[in-house]
Image (spheres, rainbow, N blue to C red):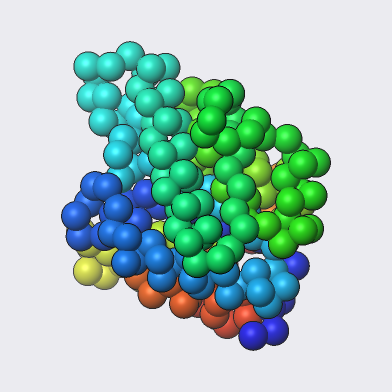
Amino acid sequence: MEPIYRRVLIKISGEALAGEKKTGFDFPFVSRVCETVKQAVESGVQVGIVIGGGNFWRGVKDGGGKVERVSADRMGMLATAMNCLAVADVFRQIGADARVMTAVDIQGVGERYDTRRAIEYLEQGKIVLFGCGTGMPFFSTDTAATLRAVEIQADALLLAKNIDGVYSDDPRKNPEAYRFDTISYEEVLARRLAVMDSTATSMAMDNALPVVVFALAEPENILRVLAGEKLGTTVG
């Protein structure tokens, strides 16, 4: 594979790692994802990863009004840290060097996030997993992924989702919904499309960060995107 990107940030949904169980981990699938990322690194791509926490806890959504918003969001941060630990361990089992960095201090879980240190790790060929979102409530892991991508000067943000691109409407509810091959940040915001939250989209737009949305159902799609194959939807 001849990659078109030097450095990327991959955002992986927590639900995708759970598979059909919807919660916890589908470890055979997680291993496929990790093997694919390892191949990408071996081809010369520097890879940072942000993982959502939806396979354990989705912040305010799972709080359901029973847990105060700030507490619910902090619980979501802990869920992302759990995911980072599990995925980092799988990476190590297959011989890849992975480091966990967290946006809040959690002794024994990972080292505190530092932009320069993260870039050093990436340049050394290490996979860096960024846990605990932005470290602040009211911000999603989409926003955290965009923020980290901008901070580490990534060439693109790859959104590996349970859906294969950006649609004009929810394809599960509207059979006439169509998928975009490319779409501008402005149109995503104007149409309120469910790519990522508006804060993340605005940050990507303000920093001219290309975003590629594709399905993680086949982990090899990561390599296809890195090779420049037109897959899913490109937002830019």
| Residue closest to the eye, 159 or 48 | 48
Q: Is residue 74 above or below residue 114?
A: above
Residue 143 appears in the figure: no
Q: Where is residue 166 drawn, in percent x and y?
A: 43, 63
- Percent across and percent down for residue 119 are 77, 49
Q: Quadrant of the C terminus?
A: bottom right
Q: Report if residue 141 is visible in the image.
A: yes
Q: How many marks?
A: 0
Image position of 42 (left or right of 14): right
143 vs 185: above or below: above
Farthest residue, direction bottom: 1
Residue found at the far top of this picture = 68
211 on left or right of 88:
right
Residue at screen point 42% across, 48% down: 86
x and y, in percent, of residue 52 in the image: 43, 45
Q: Nearer the viewer, residue 52 or 173?
A: 52
Q: Quadrant of residue 174?
A: bottom left
